[in-house]
Image (tube, rainbow, N blue to C red):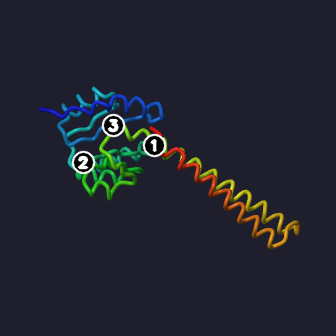
Amino acid sequence: LMDTPRSVAPEVVRRLRELGVRRMIMISGDNQRVADAVADSVGLDEARGDLLPEDKVEAIKALRRQESKLAMVGDGVNDAPALAAADVGLAMGARGAAASAEAADVVLLVDQLDRVVPAITIARRSRMIALQSVYVGIGLSVIGMAAAAAGHITPVQGALLQEAIDVAVILNALRALKGRDMH
C-alpha cells in the first residue's frame, strides 16, 4: 500500500515553476522509497522520507541555510513545527489540524492543492500594491513637507494635502481586492 499523489499535483508543480519557484522538495514521514516514487511522479526535485516531525524541522532549517527564501506547504499536525520553521508556512485547511493552521503564516481554508498557485499570485500582487502605496505615499508626503518648509503652502493646505495623499494611497491599496477571485 502507498499514498498516491493528488491528481492535480503535476500541474501545480508545473505552474509553480512558471511562477519562478526554483526547487521543490518533499519532506515526508513515509519511507524513502514511497517518497521517491511520489516525488518522481509529480516532478519534484527531491524527496526526503522517513522523517519524524522533529526531523522535518531540521530539514527545513538546513534548507533555509541554502535557500534565500523557503516556503513549506503542509496539511497535518505532524507538519506544524516545520510550517513554523519555514520563512512562509502554508497550511492546507479542510483536512489539516488546528496545530498546522496555528503554526502557519497562510491558511488555505480548502484542502485543494491547486489553490497554492493563486495564493502565491495574490500574495505577490498584494505585496506589489502595498509597496507602491508606501513609496508613493512617503514620496508625496516628503514633497508636501518640502513645499511647506519652503513656505509655498500654509499649514491648513498641508493638512488637506496630506489627507488627499492618504485617500489616494488607500484607494490604490484597494486595488488588491480586485484580484481576490484569481485562479
Residue topped by disc 1 = 120
The residue drawn where x is 47% and y is 30% is 18
User: From the viewer's perspective, is the residue at label 1 or at label 3 nearer?
Assistant: 1
Q: Secondary structure at mark 2?
A: loop
Closer to us: 112 or 140: 112
Residue topped by disc 3 = 25
The residue drawn where x is 81% and y is 64% is 146
Decide: few, some or many residues near mark 3? Use Cα within 10 Å; few <14, some 14-19, many ≥20: some
CB atoms at circles 1 and 3 under 8 Å apart? no
Closer to us: 58 or 84: 84
The quadrant in which residue 51 appears is top left
**Label whose residue precedes the other's in the sequence (2 or 3):** 3
**Label whose residue precedes the other's in the sequence (1 or 3):** 3
Residue topped by disc 2 = 95
Identify residue type, mark 1: Ile
* Alpha carbon separation for disc pair 1 and 3: 17 Å
User: From the viewer's perspective, is the residue at label 2 or at label 1 nearer?
Assistant: 2
Decide: few, some or many residues near mark 2? Use Cα within 10 Å; few <14, some 14-19, many ≥20: some
Identify residue type, mark 2: Arg
The residue drawn where x is 58% and y is 49% is 175
Q: Secondary structure at mark 1?
A: helix
Q: Which mark is residue 43?
A: none
116 relative to 149 in the view: left or right? left
**Label whose residue precedes the other's in the sequence (2 or 1):** 2
Residue 94, position in %: x, y? Answer: 27, 48
Identify residue type, mark 3: Ile
The residue drawn where x is 37% and y is 29% is 11
